[in-house]
Amino acid sequence: MPATGGLPCGVALRPLVAHADPRGVLYEIFRAEWSAHARPVQWNFVRSAAGVLRGVHLHPRHWDYLVVLDGCMTLGLADLRSGSPTEGLASIVTLDAAELRAALIPPGVAHGFYFDVPSLHVYGVDCYWNPADELGCRFDDPGLGLRWPIAPKLLSERDRALPPLAELRPHVPPYTAAAASAGGERAPA
């Protein structure tokens, strides 16, 4: 059974600071100096209905950098990288627009997004979209160790057809020390 608690090695959560004045609020959601790994070349905007689960997905090559701008996301993470100090670790994290945080997810860490309310998020990737870097497995595979808060109401056809974790494992990149430099949960520098 996978370990639980903490964050997989290389996953980072960054609280985002509000700069408010009488006109409203400005949040810096990304600065290149915050991470050596998060160097997005493409940004995507996603709106999700209540009850949607996206994933579980895994990228052999690219890093994800994401922020929930409206609503709330339950982020499931599972470290599938052989040799990682947190190999087998499963984590559930809440990202809520009421307390903006950015999440950085390295290659080899499986992740899924569950939305219990209508939500929108943006995410940047450090490689252009490529189907060869878009892998996944069943969200409810017991080998992931993810305990979702509720069964999803909506899954894409692609996610519904994903194979079991055992079929994904041969495609998971091994851990590299470069992933460790992203650290775990941390505050802005």
Image (cartoon, grey):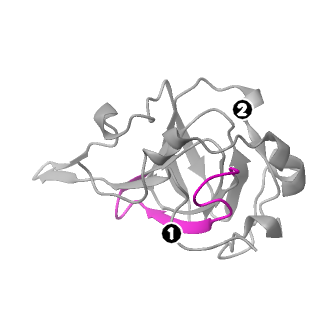
Taking the image as shown, residue 149 lies to the left or right of residue 188, namely right
Tell me the quarter of the picture where residue 92 sits.
bottom right
In this view, 124 is above or below 85: above
Taking the image as shown, residue 21 lies to the left or right of residue 112, namely left
Labelled disc at residue 6: 1
The Cα–Cα distance between marks 1 and 2, rounded to whole angstroms, is: 26 Å
Give me the residue at 63% from left, 45% from top: 175
Tell me the quarter of the picture where residue 158 sits.
top right
Tell me the quarter of the picture where residue 85 sits.
bottom right
Q: Where is residue 94 in the image (x, y as percent from the top left)?
A: 49, 67
Q: Which of 116 and 40 is in front in this view?
A: 40
Give me the residue at 75% from left, 29% from top: 131
Single out the mark in the foreground, 1 or 2.
1
Under circle 1, the secondary element is loop
Q: Nearer the viewer, residue 180 or 169?
A: 180
Q: Which of 86 and 48 is in front in this view?
A: 86
In this view, 61 is above or below 142: above
Residue numbers of the magenta segment: 81-102
Residue of label 2: 133
Q: Position of residue 93 (x, y in %)?
A: 52, 66
